Amino acid sequence: MTKDTGWNLDNSYARLPEKFFSTINTNPVRSPKLVVLNEILAESLGLDIEALQNEENIAVFVGNKLPEGASSLAQAYAGHQFGYFNMLGDGRALMIGEQITPQGERFDIQLKGSGRTPYSRGGDGRAALGPMLREYIISEAMHALGIPTTRSLAVVTTGESIIRETNLPGAIMTRVASSHLRVGTFEFAAKWGTPEELKELADYAIERHYPEIGMDEKRYLNLLKKVIERQAYLISKWQLAGFIHGVMNTDNMTISGETIDYGPCAFMDIYNPVTVFSSIDREGRYAYANQPRIAGWNLARFAETLLPLLHEDQEKAVEMAQEVLYGFSELYHANYFRGMRSKLGLFNEEKEDTALIEELLNLMQKHEADFTNTFSKLTFGTKDCAKLFGSEEFASWQEKWQERRARQPESKLESDELMRNSNPGVIPRNHRVEEALESAQSGDYSVMEKLVGVLTNPYAHTPDQEEYTKLPPDTEGPYRTFCGT
C-alpha cells in the first residue's frame, strides 16, 4: 500500500469485548471499478484524491486489499423491526477501521455490500449498484441540507452480478460515519451481554461521542439525555425538509444522532402527513407524521437498556429514565417550531405562531401543495396557478403572516434572508433520483453527476436549479421505494 494515500486507521471498537463483533475474512471481488469518489469528503478525511484512484487503492474500497492498520470486522447488534425484536448484525458490511483525520476527528470506514458475514441470515451479503448510488445521492443531499448524516466516500462496481428479481450489477459503497453505534447495539448488549459488558459499551459511547459528560455517577443518565437531544434535533430536521426515512427500526437509530441507512427513504412532494413510500410499511408505522412518535418509542427502548446502569433499584431507575424521556417531545417541538419560524422568516417567538404554522400546513394538505416549492414561493413572493395560492383561505393566512413579520424588530430584508437560508430550492426528488439511477446502471453517470452537483448547494436558488424543482408527471399509483437488499 502506498504511503501517500493518507489512511490513518485505528480500531477502538475492536477493543470492546469480542461479543460485540466478529472478525471475518474479506470477500474479494473479480473486477473492481471506481464509479464515484467523493473528493470533498476524501480531502476532509486527510486522504489523497489522486492516490485513491489508482488500481491498488481502489481495491481497498471493495476489501480486496486492506491498508496498514485496518481491521476486518462485522458488528453485532439487535433491533426492533416494525416493533418486533430480532437478533441482527452487519449482514453485508465490513468495518475496516476508524480514520483519524488531520484535525484529530474519528470516523468509521465501512464497506457496504462486501459479502457474507456471520450475521447474513442466509443472504449473499452483496449489494446492487442502484441502491448504493441511491444512498450516495441522498446522503450527500442530506449533508448539504444541514441534516446530520452518514456519508458516502466511494461507490465501486464489482464486475459481478447479483441475483435479486433479475441479475443486477454488483457494487460496494464505502460509508463514513461518526460511528455505527445504534440503539440496537445497546439492545444486543442488554439481551446477551453481561452487566460489565453493557457498562463497557456505554463508557465507550460516552468517550466516543459525549466526552464532555465525564465519568461521574450520573454519566449514564446524561448519556440518555444527550442521545435524546441529538435525536430530537435530527427528527425535527427531517420533518422540516419533508424527509421520510421509511424504516425507523431501532437498529437504524444512531447514538451519534446521524441519519443512517437510506433504503426505502424519500422526500415528500405533495404535503400529506400520512405519506409513506416504503413498500414494506403497509400499516404506515413510519409515515411522515409518525416519525417523531416513533423516535420517542425507539428512545424508550434505549432507556430500557440503560436501566441497570442508572440505579441499582429498578423502580428508581425506571423513574429516572421516564423523567428524561418525557423531555423528548418538548425538545423536538422546540426544534421543529424554531425551524418552521425560520422558514417563515420569523426571528422571535409569539404565542400564536404555532396556530399560524399549523394553519398553513392544513391549507397545503387541503390544496395538495408541494412541500418544498410552497416555502420556496413564499420566500421569493412568487405565485403560480397552484390551487393553494389562488384560494381565499390562503389570502387570509398570508395577511396574518405578513402582519406577524411586521411586528418583529428585524427588517423585511433580514427576514427574507432568513427564509432564503432556511428553505431549500431543491431536494432529491424521487423521479430525478430514479432518472439518474437508470442512466447510471446503463453506464451513463452524467445525469447523476449533474443531479449531485445541483443538490450540493440547495440554498443557492440559482436558475440552473429551476428544472429540478418541477414535480413528477402524473402516474397511475403512488411512488414506492424498496430496501434494496
Image (cartoon, grey):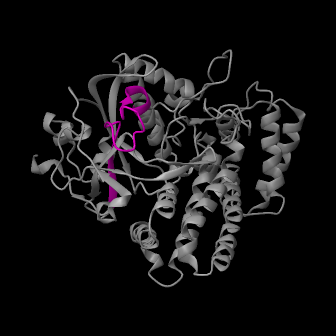
Asked if the stretch drawn in magenta spans residue 116, the answer is: yes
Choose top left, top right, bottom left or bottom right for residue 209. bottom left
* Near-viewer residue (445 or 2): 2
Residue for point 47% across, 49% down: 149
Q: Residue drawn at (70%, 31%), measured in percent from left and top?
A: 270
Left or right? Give the position of 25 relative to 187: left
Which residue occupies the foreground of this view, 471 or 77? 77
Q: The C terminus appears in which quarter of the rendering?
A: top left
Give the x, y percent position of residue 399: 85, 45
Could you tell me if residue 402 is visible in this image?
A: no
Pick out the residue farthest to the left.
Answer: 2
Question: Above or below — where is 6 with respect to 131?
Answer: below
Q: Quadrant of residue 104?
A: bottom left
Residue 172 on image: x %, y %: 32, 34
Q: Nearer the viewer, residue 145 or 348?
A: 145
Q: Position of residue 27 (x, y in %)?
A: 24, 36
Span of residues in magenta: 106-132
Q: Residue at horizontal 71%, vertical 61%?
A: 329
396 left or right, relative to 311 = right
Q: Position of residue 343 (x, y in %)?
A: 67, 49
Q: Is residue 166 left or right of residue 328?
A: left
Residue drawn at 23 percent across, 49 percent down: 47
State whether residue 128 appears in this view.
Answer: yes
Q: Is residue 10 magenta?
A: no
| Above or below, comparing residue 314 to residue 332 in the picture | below
